[in-house]
Image (tube, rainbow, N blue to C red):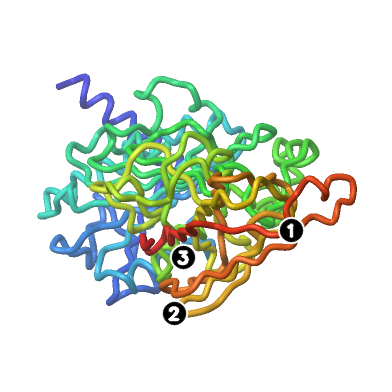
């Protein structure tokens, strides 16, 4: 008992220097936000509602527009309690101290949850949504909260956590359901990590650089390590673009009608090469973001998205499988496919003179589109023989297919 009391006093003492604060948002009182805590009460927090606990990461704070966007999206989607954690007094340089402070913040969140349980709340109805170093803090909190419902880790911090024991990082034992999204595992800065941390780990665009985000460069690393010269807004827009893309993806997943379906595969290269089917006949797929489900596909899942500079970010995934007849021996050229759906029509390139089509062969392509075509009604394939005069004599002027199959992965229609 004395040992536990000593630990508790140590947490409180360090918490005072870190200055952890909790702010409650509800549909009744969205703004101005209300500070809550074990010593000042829970305000309008309602035990009958689910509770979302948000945690920002290193250098970030709770006043940024992206957190208010997420809070409003959550409240629009569900009548819940949203608690924003602010530990911005303890998340500055050096990173070693910030990551150490995170353990204290995690313990403080656990104490708040236990306080809520004492006022009728249930850990199973609580969902922690946390970014970067905040996602690792969520792990510290989760290991102290038996029966915690869910943790959504948004690009969990890699430095000092990657390839470490599960006891010191986010892992599947920290909640009943742990879903993780990886967006910035580039090797130069390694803000995130490719290492799986949850029951389901989703890697949009391979989990590294996100579309339209600047590529990581050594000079940006120099800027990050020099606290005196940091322009935080500039850093967020450049160096941390891929790292913060996940926050926007998650918020968009709450609001959007896009399914953000993610698909199982051994690697992103295999996924892009259409070597893994997007037909989820046995529930192997899952949705990225807020509507991820513990009863759907787990493990490593992949998907592509559109540019990060505009919403919606989702891409719709179509798999086209073309089986040739035995009528001709071989050919090469440009194959284009026109897909006519109930919502739209789109012409896409199936092969641009890159593949030799052979008799009775099967060619498969994964084609992401920026819009939902609806249910596919008609498929038209057009072929133009290669113009390469050196080799064109070896190829047929005509080609025929026995069957063309189109799979709409997001609608799971064939």
- Quarter of the N terminus within the rendering: top left
Q: Residue furthest front?
A: 327
Q: Secondary structure at mark 3?
A: helix
Q: Residues within 10 Å of mark 2 (few under 14, many from 20)?
A: few
Q: Residues within 10 Å of mark 3 (few under 14, many from 20)?
A: many
Please identify, in this view, whether the residue under mark 1 or under mark 3 is nearer the observer: 1
Q: Residues within 10 Å of mark 1 (few under 14, many from 20)?
A: some
As measured in the structure, the alpha-carbon distance from the residue carrying label 2 to the one carrying label 1 is: 33 Å
Q: Specify the label residue 397 is tagged with.
A: 1
Observer-nearest of 381 and 135: 381
* Lower position in the chain sequence, tag 1 or tag 3: 3
In the picture of the structure, the residue carrying the numbered disc 2 is 342
In the picture of the structure, the residue carrying the numbered disc 3 is 252
Residue beneath the point at 43% across and 62% down? 408
Image spot of residue 97 (x, y percent): 53, 31
Observer-nearest of 273 and 400: 400
Residue 266 against residue 246 in the figure, above or below: above
Dot 2 and dot 1 residues touching (CB under 8 Å): no
Observer-nearest of 151 and 373: 373
């Amino acid at each position: 008992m004395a040992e536990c009391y000593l630990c508790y006093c140590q947490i409180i003492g360090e918490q005072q220097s870190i200055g952890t604060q909790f702010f409650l948002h509800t549909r009744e009182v969205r703004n101005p936000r209300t500070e809550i805590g074990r010593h000042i009460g829970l305000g309008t927090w309602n035990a009958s509602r689910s509770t979302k606990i948000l945690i920002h990461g290193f250098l970030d704070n709770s006043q940024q527009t992206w957190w208010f966007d997420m809070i409003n999206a959550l409240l629009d989607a569900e009548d819940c309690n949203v608690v924003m954690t602010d530990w911005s007094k303890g998340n500055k340089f050096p990173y070693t101290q910030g990551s150490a402070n995170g353990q204290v913040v995690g313990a403080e969140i656990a104490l708040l949850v236990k306080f809520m349980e004492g006022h009728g709340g249930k850990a199973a109805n609580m969902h922690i949504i946390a970014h970067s170093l905040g996602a690792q803090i969520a792990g510290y909190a989760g290991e102290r909260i038996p029966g915690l419902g869910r943790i959504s880790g948004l690009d969990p911090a890699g430095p000092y956590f990657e390839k470490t024991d599960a006891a010191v990082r986010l892992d599947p034992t920290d909640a009943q359901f742990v879903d993780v999204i990886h967006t910035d595992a580039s090797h130069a800065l390694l803000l995130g990590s490719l290492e799986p941390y949850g029951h389901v780990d989703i890697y949009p665009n391979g989990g590294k650089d996100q579309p339209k985000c600047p590529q990581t460069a050594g000079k940006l690393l120099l800027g990050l390590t020099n606290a005196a010269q940091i322009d935080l807004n500039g850093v967020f827009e450049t160096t941390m673009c891929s790292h913060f893309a996940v926050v926007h993806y998650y918020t968009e997943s709450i609001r959007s009608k896009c399914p953000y379906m993610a698909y199982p595969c051994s690697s992103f290269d295999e996924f892009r090469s259409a070597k893994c089917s997007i037909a989820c006949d046995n529930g192997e797929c899952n949705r990225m973001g807020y509507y991820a489900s513990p009863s759907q596909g787990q493990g490593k899942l992949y998907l592509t998205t559109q540019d990060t500079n505009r919403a919606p970010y989702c891409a719709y995934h179509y798999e086209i499988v073309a089986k040739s007849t035995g009528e001709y021996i071989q050919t090469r050229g440009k194959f284009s496919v026109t897909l006519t759906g109930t919502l739209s029509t789109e012409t896409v390139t199936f092969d641009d003179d890159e593949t030799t089509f052979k008799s009775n062969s099967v060619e498969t392509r994964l084609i992401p589109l920026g819009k939902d075509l609806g249910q596919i009604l008609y498929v038209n394939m057009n072929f133009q023989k290669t113009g390469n005069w050196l080799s064109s004599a070896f190829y047929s002027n005509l080609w025929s297919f026995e069957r063309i199959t189109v799979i709409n992965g997001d609608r799971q229609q064939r």
